[in-house]
Amino acid sequence: VGLKRVKKPKSSDVVVPDEIDLPLDGSYKLDLDGKSFMPVGHGFPKPKPQKIPTELAIYRLMAGTKNPHQDVKDWMKEYEENFLERHTELALIASDRK
């Protein structure tokens, strides 16, 4: 049963036959039908592309705070110098494609 051998499994146990070679790292789960193992994450729709880069959204949140910590100010300055213009342009292009 799962990670350990038992002589008599309970009704709630998941019995895995010896010939199954699934990894034991949690990357598979028992399907709802109880008859098959599926990779974790299987069955979910592919996420839609984001309209703005994650970093731009975080920057905008930080820019809206009244008194950010110095490390936040430092990150914002670095972001402004290196990425803000590019990410803003990408967001505008994405919004035009609606």
Image: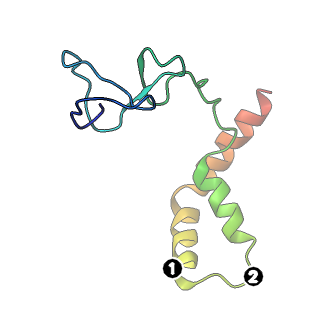
Q: Quadrant of residue 1?
A: top left
Residue 66 tag number: 2
**Amino acid type, residue under disc 2 in the picture:** Lys
At label 1, counting other C-alpha atoms closer than 10 Å, the crowd grade (few under 14, some 14-19, many 20 or more) is few
Residue visible at 69% across and 85% down in the picture: 67
Along the viewing direction, whichever of 33 and 11 lies nearer the viewer: 11
Residue 71, compared with residue 18, is above or below; it is below
Instruction: Return the mark for residue 71.
Output: 1
Q: Where residue 59 is drawn, which disc sits there?
A: none
Mark 2 lies on a secondary structure that is loop
> Does residue 14 lie above or below 69 as drawn?
above
Q: How many marks?
A: 2
Q: How many other residues sit within 10 Å of disc 2, few (<14), some (14-19) or many (≥20)?
A: few
Rendered location of residue 56, percent (x, y) = 64, 54
Out of 10 and 3, give the one closest to the viewer.
10
- Residue at position x 71%, y 34% from top? 94
Q: Position of residue 23 (x, y in %)?
A: 25, 30
Colour setting:
rainbow
Residue 59 vs residue 96, the one in the foreground: 59
**Could you say whether the residue bearing mark 1 is in a helix, strand or loop?**
helix
Is 53 positioned to the left or the right of 9 in the image? right
What is the distance, in whole Å, between disc 1 and disc 2 at their CAs? 14 Å
Amino acid type for the residue under numbered disc 1: Asp
